[in-house]
Amino acid sequence: MKKNYFILVTLILMGCKKNFDNTNNISELKLPAYSETGAQTFGFLLNDSVWTNFGKYFYNDGITSGWRDNEVISEYTYAGTSNDVAFQVSGRLTIVDNNIATKDISAALSFVPDLPYEKIYSLTGDYPRNFNVNDNISYKFYRIKQGTTFTLNVTKFDTVEKVCSGRLNGILYNDQNSNDSIIIKDGRFDAKIP
């Protein structure tokens, strides 16, 4: 009997999901202040509109589901078959209207830090030297076009304080239509080095 009661209560609680809506907070979207402290911030102007890490995404792992906060993630990744180790910063902006994502745009930056760490890097679009923006609603994926460069200015890369900060700008092109591009400007990030 107690087992059946426990199962019933669990099922009821799992079914009680609160609607999520962050459309009232859209006016709060602004670029994060530029900093060099490891504040885990990431933002830029995307065709003159603010993109910054914001909102929550819906997850369903087969057992539980719900809304999770978007986070700025900084990590080292291995660059395929080369011996290079890339530093990556990623984030996501998600606008949700009554449990329906109306905007969901993720962005990721990766580069291979080399001495001197603090300098201007030209990202070519070949992994691990790239920047991309994905519109997860319309399934448009923007990348650095072959033969063009995207500028990344790493202003701080401190392995003692474990901080990587910088600025970025350039043009990205739709994977499926090279006539469709987006302009990224006034980009900035301030991340922790793991």
Image (cartoon, rainbow, N blue to C red):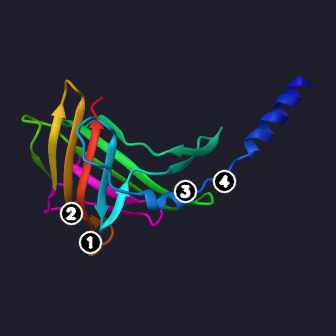
Residue 84 disc label: none
Compute the Cα span from label 4 to label 1.
39 Å
Compute the Cα span from label 3 to label 2.
34 Å
Instruction: Decide whether residue 127 is among the magenta residues.
Output: yes
Q: Could you tell me residue 41's position as x and y percent?
A: 33, 44
Residue highlighted by disc 2: 145
Residue highlighted by disc 4: 19
Q: Amino acid at mark 4?
A: Asn
Which residue: 28% across, 35% down?
Answer: 38
Judge by depth and name the residue closer to the eye, 124 or 46: 46
Specify the segment rendered in magenta. 124-150
Q: Amino acid at mark 1?
A: Ser
Q: Amino acid at mark 2?
A: Lys
Of the numbered discs 3 and 2, the one sitting upstream in the chain is 3
Of the numbered discs 4 and 2, the one sitting upstream in the chain is 4
On screen, residue 159 above or below 106: above
Q: Secondary structure at mark 2?
A: loop
With 141 as the anchor, is 58 left or right in this view? right
Residue 27 seen in the current view: yes
Judge by depth and name the residue closer to the eye, 52 or 151: 52
Instruction: Decide whether residue 178 is among the magenta residues.
Output: no
Residue highlighted by disc 1: 178
Q: Secondary structure at mark 4?
A: loop
Of the numbered discs 3 and 1, the one sitting upstream in the chain is 3
3 vs 2, front mark: 3
Q: Amino acid at mark 3?
A: Asn
